[in-house]
Image (cartoon, rainbow, N blue to C red):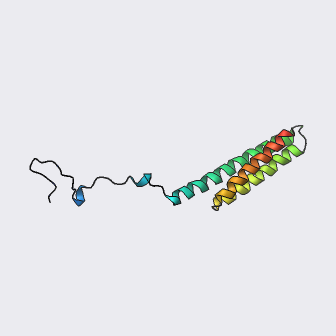
């Protein structure tokens, strides 16, 4: 079949060279892409939270806060940094729980201020 009718219109069948761009495969859920995105998210979030915890620890250390406050911020930042390392290695579920624990430790230290 040539793909043309008598009126010059195209039929529903397409020749191999007439195939439109079928590069819209991005809609398919790719587990490898999802895992890569989860690793990057865990790593980036852990790094950001650890930097924020260290900055808060240094700010509280120079102030008149009790010693437990900057120590809690520093320990929470260390937990978040460890979570970033685990996230980079693909242990995203453990990294998520450690990120939650690290932020909770920092929030607990803030309560002593």
Query: Most extreme residue toward the left, as rendered?
Result: 6
The one nearer the camera, 24 or 59, is 24
Assign the C terminus to one quadrant of the image. Answer: top right
Query: Most extreme residue toward the front, as rendered?
Result: 12
In percent of width and height, residue 71 lies at: 85, 48
Residue at figure coordinates x 54%, y 56% from the top left: 34
In the picture provided, is 67 more to the left or to the right than 85? right
Assign the N terminus to one quadrant of the image. Answer: bottom left
Residue at figure coordinates x 59%, y 54% from the top left: 38
Residue at figure coordinates x 8%, y 50% from the top left: 6
In percent of width and height, residue 19 lies at: 27, 55
In the rendered image of this protein, does residue 36 appear above or below residue 62? below
In percent of width and height, residue 30 lies at: 49, 58
Q: How many marks?
A: 0
In percent of width and height, residue 10 lies at: 17, 50
């Amino acid at each position: 079949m040539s793909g043309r009718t008598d009126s010059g219109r195209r039929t529903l069948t397409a020749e191999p060279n007439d195939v439109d761009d079928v590069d819209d495969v991005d809609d398919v859920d790719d587990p490898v892409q999802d895992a890569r995105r989860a690793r990057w998210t865990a790593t980036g979030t852990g790094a950001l939270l650890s930097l924020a915890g260290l900055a808060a620890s240094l700010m509280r250390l120079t102030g008149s806060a009790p010693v437990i406050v900057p120590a809690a911020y520093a320990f929470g930042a260390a937990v978040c940094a460890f979570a970033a390392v685990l996230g980079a290695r693909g242990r995203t579920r453990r990294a998520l729980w450690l990120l939650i624990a690290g932020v909770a430790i920092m929030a607990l230290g803030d309560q002593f201020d």
